Image (tube, rainbow, N blue to C red):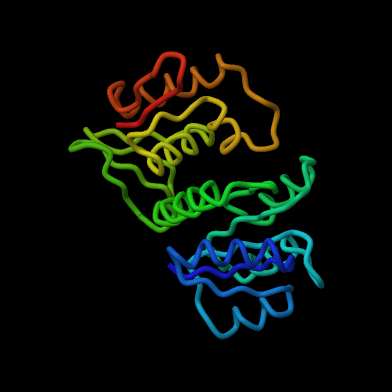
Amino acid sequence: MKILLMEDDPVLGGIILDYLEHFYTVDRVFDSAEAIETLDGAHYDLLIFDVNVPGQSGIELLKDIRSYHDTTPAIIITAYEDTRHLKESFDAGAHDYIRKPFDLEELKLRIEKSKVLFRIEQDTRIVLSPTLSYSPRDKAVEGAGRRRILKPKEAKLLEYFLAHPHRIIPAEELIQNIWHYETMPTDATIRSHIRHLREIIGSEKITTQRGLGYRYE
């Protein structure tokens, strides 16, 4: 996996680079102009952009990249804690958003998540069971002579479960990654979405771990 890291802080950038190079091929740039020049000459599997860098911000740069129909997964990192920058990041096309300070292991987990989500976005059909398949492009579950179109939140839930199989996922994690900056859902709302999703893909696919969260099998 090849990553482009844009971080102008010499200390933090160096720490992130040293850590990630144990697992990936990483090029590090300090500002948006250098990032643009680097992107012109190489292909990357993931972009990690800090918001506050010289020149264009990481969010503005990502927005420009998306205008050229580039769907490379992107993670925005920032010291901002307000929801405005969170909203702007996802509106610009970010796949994930992480606030400083963060654990390096958390960053690696988010990178691994981006790899799976990118695969989901590119697949035309994902096998859910011997009789069911899911089309990310159409947000449709097909099988047994039926085709069911998922509601937006149900599709996001299914894709998040597909990206994190066999792991207990707390409701708080689902809220953070699916609802983002929108009005926070109630527990009843989450249960309702999952109940409807179970009716479509099978109740045995998503199990409830009482007091802990949900698990996709």
Residue visible at 56% across and 75% down in the picture: 27
Give the quadrant of the N terminus.
bottom left
Whether 71 is drawn above or below 112: the answer is below
Give the quadrant of the C terminus.
top left
Looking at the image, residue 170 sits to the left or right of residue 179; the answer is left
Residue 53, by quadrant, is bottom right
Looking at the image, residue 109 sits to the left or right of residue 165; the answer is right
Whether 96 is drawn above or below 188: the answer is below
Whether 213 is drawn above or below 99: the answer is above
Percent across and percent down for residue 102 are: 63, 47
Looking at the image, residue 9 sits to the left or right of residue 200; the answer is right
Residue visible at 64% across and 37% down in the picture: 180
Residue 161, by quadrant, is top left
Residue 133, by quadrant, is top left
Nearer to me, 204 or 51: 51
Residue visible at 79% across and 44% down in the picture: 84
Percent across and percent down for residue 182 are: 69, 33
Percent across and percent down for residue 35 are: 66, 76
Percent across and percent down for residue 4 are: 57, 70
